[in-house]
């Protein structure tokens, strides 16, 4: 921030995240998951019921938006429309986040492990940076499990920096993971680690 104003980098980052949310909400309904050739993908949304939960939240959000609009419009039409627009914006984010979780799976490839939690964060971890794998009962600093607890905790040799939307960063050394097809994921990850 210079003189109380956000930097150009911050403004660009915020705009990029906003555009991604709208892209996933409106342009990706028939898209296939983002998987690079030669990588092995593990989704994180099926067993957790992410789509069902987000669908219920979106439907309830629509019902609430209509009810609040009519209630507030009795006193102030401008306020009612402002709240309706803000609620619509929130619904776009809910749909965009759900779609991004569905379309951005965890990947194992020759470069390492790519952990992704939709639009929330992503992290590239070389296999050599992984110190150990623990069961899900271990404590964790971050998690790739949209609902519920992790099934495995990946412990890194050194803390990694997670970059969240809007430029927020956080250090994590133990990352909890819950992917669909979890036993196959652990087996594949262990074999990749040992091959390093």
Image: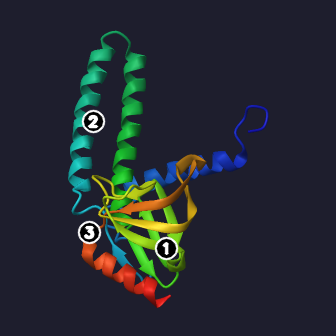
| Tags 3 and 1 touching, CB below 8 Å | no
Q: Quadrant of residue 176?
A: bottom left
Residue 186 at x, y = what percent?
32, 76
Q: In this view of the protein, can residue 37 be seen by the observer?
A: no
SS at mark 1 in the image: strand
SS at mark 2 in the image: helix
SS at mark 3 in the image: loop
Which disc, if any, is residue 61? 2
The one nearer the camera, 60 or 180, is 180
Residue topped by disc 3: 180
Q: Is residue 149 left or right of residue 193?
A: left
**Residue drawn where x is 53% and y is 50% of the image:** 165
Q: Is residue 158 left or right of residue 152?
A: right
Dot 2 crowding, Cα within 10 Å, few <14, some 14–19, many 20+: some
Q: Quadrant of the N terminus?
A: top right
Which disc, if any, is residue 49? none
Residue topped by disc 1: 130
**Residue drawn where x is 30% and y is 67% of the image:** 179
Residue 13 at x, y = what percent?
61, 51
Q: In this view of the protein, can residue 150 be seen by the observer?
A: yes
């Amino acid at each position: 921030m210079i003189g109380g104003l956000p930097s150009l980098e911050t403004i660009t980052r915020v705009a990029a995240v906003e555009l991604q949310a709208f892209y996933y909400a409106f342009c990706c309904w028939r898209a296939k998951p983002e998987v690079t050739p030669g990588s092995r993908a593990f989704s994180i949304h099926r067993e957790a019921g992410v789509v069902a939960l987000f669908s219920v939240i979106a439907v309830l959000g629509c019902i609430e938006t209509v009810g609040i609009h009519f209630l507030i419009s009795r006193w102030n039409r401008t306020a009612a429309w402002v709240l309706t627009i803000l609620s619509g914006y929130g619904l776009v984010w809910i749909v965009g986040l759900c779609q991004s979780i569905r379309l951005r799976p965890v990947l194992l490839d020759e470069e390492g492990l790519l952990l992704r939690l939709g639009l929330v964060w992503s992290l590239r971890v070389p296999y050599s940076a992984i110190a150990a794998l623990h069961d899900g009962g271990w404590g964790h600093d971050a998690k790739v499990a949209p609902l519920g607890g992790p099934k495995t905790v990946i412990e890194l040799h050194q803390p990694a920096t997670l970059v969240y939307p809007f430029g927020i960063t956080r250090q994590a050394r133990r990352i909890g993971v819950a992917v669909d097809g979890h036993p196959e994921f652990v087996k594949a990850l262990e074999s990749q680690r040992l091959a390093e």
